[in-house]
Image: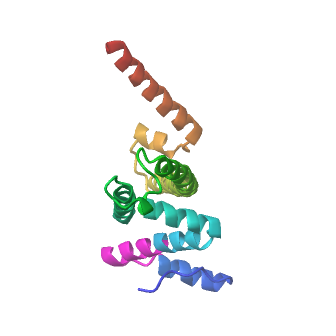
Amino acid sequence: MPASSAPPSDNSSVNSYNDSYHTPMSAQELTQRNIESVAALDASTKSQRSRADLVADAIAAFCGSMAFVYVHLVWFALWIIANLPFMPKALHFDPFPYQFLTLAVSLEAIFLSTFILISQNRQALLSDRRNHLDLQINLLAEQENSKMLAMLESIQKKLGIEDSDPEVQILEASTRPDQLAKQIEEIIEGENKKKHEKT
């Protein structure tokens, strides 16, 4: 199935695009469309990376692979074997306790940790953007649901159906993220305090 493209600019084309986007389809096609949308967002984000980001990501990916372990095993083994007492003295460039090897590994650790932190910071930024996108979509979905409840209640009144459900009135109210965040924080802090008091 072809990847979804940006909607056209004119109103008629926009309407046809929206109709095709919301056309009922099978669960498999719907899932595939969603996956393609997410993949397109990831590809767009990756295409915006700078050369420094590409280098940092490549180094971080190599450090997290078994190839990195094998390279260092071979490196350390050859280094130590070359400096053993029974080896020719011409090969001895860093005898025990291998001070030069210690220096090289320490410098490597400094640079590798820096590259990994750069990659992690970029991934954290992307995660924050995805979380913000999820929040916006959830808020839009909540607003749509609240509007549908209000429309259903209006239809119900016009049809003369009396059904006073207090939960419906509560759900029709707009959700305020700041109040929800404060409520969640208070509940979590209260539970943590109770756990500390028990311990």
Q: Tell me if 146 is positioned left or right of 76 in this view.
A: right
Quarter of the figure with the C terminus? top left
* Front residue of this view, candidates 69 and 44: 69
Position above or below: 4 against 192: below
Q: Dominant secondary structure of the magenta stretch?
A: helix
Q: Is residue 31 magenta?
A: yes
Is 39 left or right of 132, judged from the image as shown?
A: left
The residue at the point 39 percent across, 55 percent down is 83
Q: Residue at x 57, y 67 (%)?
A: 55
Seen in the picture, residue 15 relative to 138 is either above or below; the reply is below
Q: Which residues are magenta?
A: 22-37
Residue 170 placement (x, y as % from top left):
47, 39
Q: Quadrant of residue 136?
A: bottom right
The residue positioned 36% from the left and 13% from the top of the image is 197
Nearer the observer, 38 or 126:
126
x then y, percent, for residue 56: 56, 62
Q: Position of residue 148 (x, y in %)?
A: 49, 57
Left or right side of 140 for 89: left
Most foreground residue, 124 or 3? 124
- Residue 155 visible in rendering: yes
Q: Residue at x 31, y 76 (%)?
A: 28
Q: Is residue 67 left or right of residue 8?
A: left
